[in-house]
Image (tube, coloured by chain):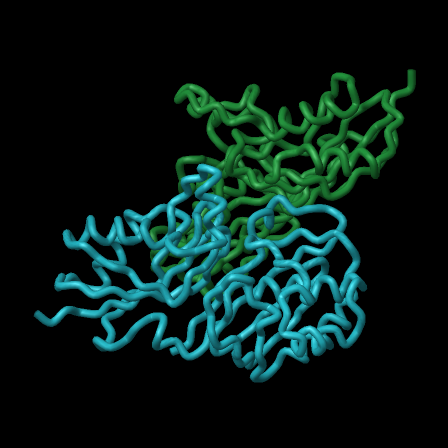
Chain colours: A cyan, B green
Amino acid sequence: VIQRNIKITLEYDGTAYSGWQTQGYKSQAPAVRQGSHKPTIQESIEKVLQKILQEKVHLIGSGRTDAGVHALAQVANFKTNSGILAQKLQRALNGLLPADISVLKIEEIKPDFHSRFSAKAKTYRYTILNRPQRSAFLRDRAYFYRYPLNFQLMQREAKALLGRHDFAAFCASGASAKDTRRTIRKIVLRKNGGLITIEIEADGFLYNMVRNIVGTLLEIGRGKFPAGSMRKILRLKNREAAGPTAPARGLVLVKVKY
Amino acid sequence: VIQRNIKITLEYDGTAYSGWQTQGYKSQAPAVRQGSHKPTIQESIEKVLQKILQEKVHLIGSGRTDAGVHALAQVANFKTNSGILAQKLQRALNGLLPADISVLKIEEIKPDFHSRFSAKAKTYRYTILNRPQRSAFLRDRAYFYRYPLNFQLMQREAKALLGRHDFAAFCASGASAKDTRRTIRKIVLRKNGGLITIEIEADGFLYNMVRNIVGTLLEIGRGKFPAGSMRKILRLKNREAAGPTAPARGLVLVKVKY
């Protein structure tokens, strides 16, 4: 039997979920221990897919976003024996999925496409609300950081991250990656009033890499780490030299390139 | 005893509330009948103010936003005997209020300032998501409208509303307004990809006026009402001639001018 391979592009608000996938994820163990029973995005979609297709489905994501992390265009794929039209499947999914998950696109794709292994690059964006008052609208979409930040210094320091480096200093301790080298192709900091965004495109990301880079940039912006710190921290390859992990809510997976 | 008059500027996500105030509001009676017990924004803030100030407080809003309607800068005021500093009160409020209500500004103001009666103009913005797929991120912030719209026609027709008119056709039936004349100073339609926003500034608004104007513009954009309809509907002064009331979730109170 030749199965069809279906590619899905998804938008989701990660606030109510324990991440893309729970299994095997250290960072999410505490939530489970504390008895929080938020569903995962993956299982929520698989459940609806199985209802529509009347067969068991295994959904593979391009990467596992953490609890509270959002996606503007996550990509996933699954194999199916069903002959359902892509357009019909998309309508059925958007009709049955919860309001905080939406399907932007569905297409049939060549059999060897794998949303994770075929990915060539990813873009993440982190949003910081830097003003004296918190925002009701951005409560789950930005990190509220009230202390004044030296934005120009953050911009300059971020440039040290461009290119191919060993990002061990920005990798969650205990993560399983053997090779901690990655290539950052683009890192763009923007400021618009009290809103600061940090957008990073790389060929791949280590676990917590964006949130650890952001935590470090915030320490720099606040004056806790001096100019030149970013280059130094990269060289030290030691997680403890870098800043803390910025909260999940400010992070969004913007794009996956194939 | 001379009481201080305190002006508050508020941002809120109205999704979890039954509106600014429940009392005396026809449109909210069904929710109450159905046993939904969402709190009002007003009572939520009054409760926290009373806790902080240790006295009974009556909060007056510039107007009563409906259940599900949001505010970027609602204005309210209250009288107090407390000598608390504005800055301290703001910090205490933002510490104790729920995450979906935030206080942007607090200032002491002259005794005769009344957030409703002193208002000179208000601006509302309505957001429509006009594309084939719904959006997880905008689920509570925009009206998802999937049918193709003639945006240019909507823009042209909206111009008929500019200036002083009797807006009886756009006033909820059963509303108590005796004089249904208002002046629209500005009406701006913008389109950015699938997002359409309609921003209206007026010296005042009748009950459901923005949502009824938007509902009518959508009928025009979809081709159900021909060109010239807006002018005709205005002249008819009959609610039944206009389009349906657009959903609350797309509406946000942007600004109150004094």
Q: Residue at x 83, y 39 (%)?
A: B87
Q: Please tell me which residue lies in front, B246 or A33.
A: A33
B231 with respect to B55 (left or right): left
Q: At which x and y percent is residue A121?
A: 45, 77
> Do we see residue B226 in this rendering?
no
In the image, farthest residue toward the bottom: A163
What percent of the width, then of the height, locates residue B231? 49, 49
Which quadrant would the C terminus of chain A be assigned to in this image?
bottom left
Quadrant of the rendered structure where residue B130 is? bottom left
Q: Nearer the viewer, residue A206 or B199?
A: A206
**Looking at the image, which residue sits at the far right?**
B1
Residue A74 falls in which quadrant of the image?
Answer: bottom left
Residue at the spot x=48%, y=66% of the render?
A: A254
Quadrant of the drawing holding the N terminus of chain A: bottom left
Q: Is residue A114 left or right of residue A182?
A: left
Residue B95 image position (x, y, % from top left) = 71, 36
Decide if residue A131 is in sight here. yes
The residue that appears at 73% across and 46% down in the rendered structure is A133
Identify which residue, B171 or B105, lies in the foreground: B105
Q: Residue drawn at (15%, 61%), measured in percent from left and top?
A: A84
Q: State whether residue B30 is above or below residue B182.
A: above
Relative to B12, does residue A155 appear above or below in the rendering?
below
- Give the x, y percent position of residue B197: 53, 55
| Image vertical order of residue B144 relative to residue B27, above or below | below
* Residue B148 horizontal side relative to residue B46, left or right: left
- The image quarter containing residue A5 is bottom left
* Residue B89 relative to residue A137: left or right: right
Rendered view: B85 above or below A228: above
